[in-house]
Image: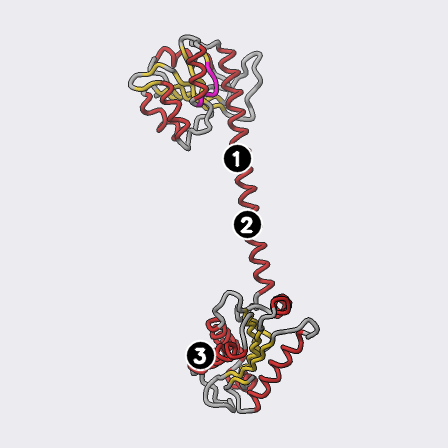
């Protein structure tokens, strides 16, 4: 193997190659062919020449030097030249590199088979120097343009993927409460309206849980707002764990108040879910010395359910849940009312 960085000068009648480099890999076991090609290239600017006499090393060498064009003899020791062309096309490093087949004779059948197996061009040995240089430049420029297009496409595809991810994240953020990770009020309003219309259309039950942390202001006054935020996060987790069906939605309604939407759920099922949330929060045993409902943080829940009619406003269901919550508070807190 030999590598030559050829000196810079222009060959008469050939366009200058200042904008790109031509890296030629010659695969031929005959040293005389290597000398002929090297002399043909002379000291052209931005031409780099490598000669591989052992065809078994051709692909590994190509992986190291990244040729822009391969000159490939058809008659090689130990391997058929066309088989080697197939191997170039099967290798991801040489898959798209132009391959110019060199042959001592011009046979249509051999040409056809060479192109079928992935050859880019075909020259009879010894090639005319002017024609050889022109084809090396042509195939190199086409290859480098393809590489640039592929890279531009990859960059564009990556940018599009990043944009899609950013848009997805932005959409998620517009739906999520930043503190608790539950849905926010904006998403809740949209979702509740959709499920209300579905319940009207299908005449199925829609239930709402109105959830409030008991004595939360005294908790904040006693333990501080950072501890209060932690309480809200833990309550949110308890609600999320309890509303386990795909259609169920939990949201932060505002402040220390939460809401659960249970589509296709009757009152008994909604009360069961509400009681589960209440027990989970109670079991956390978060100290609350300023609570009027016990020694730990608790919640009260109002439950309402309806099979809505077309002339029934959605606000009726929310008001019913709010009234139920008021009853739970008035009855001593830490309980479920409907």
For mark 2, what is the residue? 162
Sooner in the amino-acid sequence: mark 2 or mark 3: 2
State which mark lies toward you, 1 or 3: 3
Is 3 colored magenta in this rendering? no
Residue 24: in sight, yes or no? no
**Most extreme residue toward the left, as rendered?**
78
For mark 1, what is the residue? 150
Q: 31 above or below 248?
A: above
- Magenta segment: 118-122
Mark 3, Cα crowd under 10 Å, few <14 / some 14-19 / many 20+, is some
Mark 2, Cα crowd under 10 Å, few <14 / some 14-19 / many 20+, is few
Secondary structure at numbered mark 3? helix
Secondary structure at numbered mark 1? helix
The image quadrant that residue 225 belongs to is bottom right
Sooner in the amino-acid sequence: mark 2 or mark 1: 1
- Work out which quarter of the rendered image holds the C terminus and state it: bottom right
Sooner in the amino-acid sequence: mark 1 or mark 3: 1
Q: Which mark is residue 280?
A: 3
- What percent of the width, then of the height, locates residue 24? 44, 21
Q: Nearer the viewer, residue 165 or 338?
A: 338
State which mark lies toward you, 2 or 3: 3
- Residue occupying the point 52% across, 86% down: 222
Residue 294: in sight, yes or no? yes
């Amino acid at each position: 193997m030999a590598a030559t960085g050829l000196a810079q000068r222009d060959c008469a009648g050939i366009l200058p190659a200042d904008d790109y480099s031509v890296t030629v890999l010659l695969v031929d076991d005959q040293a005389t062919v290597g000398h002929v090609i090297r002399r043909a290239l002379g000291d052209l600017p931005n031409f780099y020449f490598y000669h591989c006499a052992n065809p078994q090393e051709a692909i590994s060498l190509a992986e190291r030097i990244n040729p822009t064009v391969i000159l490939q003899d058809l008659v090689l020791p130990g391997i058929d030249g066309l088989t080697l062309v197939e191997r170039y096309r099967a290798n991801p490093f040489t898959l798209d590199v132009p391959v110019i087949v060199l042959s001592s004779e011009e046979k249509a059948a051999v040409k056809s088979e060479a192109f079928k197996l992935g050859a880019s061009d075909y020259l009879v040995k010894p090639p005319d120097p002017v024609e050889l240089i022109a084809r090396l430049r042509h195939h190199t420029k086409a290859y480098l343009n393809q590489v640039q297009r592929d890279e531009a496409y990859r960059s564009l595809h990556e940018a599009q993927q990043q944009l899609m991810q950013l848009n997805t994240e932005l959409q998620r953020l517009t739906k999520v409460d930043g503190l608790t990770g539950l849905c926010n009020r904006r998403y809740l309003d949209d979702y509740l309206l959709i499920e209300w219309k579905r319940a009207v259309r299908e005449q199925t039950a829609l239930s709402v849980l109105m959830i409030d942390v008991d004595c939360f202001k005294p908790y904040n006054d006693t333990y501080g707002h950072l501890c209060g935020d932690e309480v809200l996060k833990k309550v949110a987790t308890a609600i999320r764990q309890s509303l386990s069906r795909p259609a169920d939605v939990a949201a932060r309604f505002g402040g220390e108040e939460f809401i659960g939407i249970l589509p296709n759920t009757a009152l008994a099922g909604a009360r069961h879910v509400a009681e589960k949330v209440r027990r989970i929060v109670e079991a956390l045993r978060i100290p609350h010395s300023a609570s009027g409902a016990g020694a730990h943080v608790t919640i009260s829940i109002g439950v309402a359910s309806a099979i809505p009619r077309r002339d029934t406003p959605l606000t009726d269901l929310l008001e019913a849940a709010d009234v139920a919550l008021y009853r739970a508070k008035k009855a001593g807190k830490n309980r479920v009312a409907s």
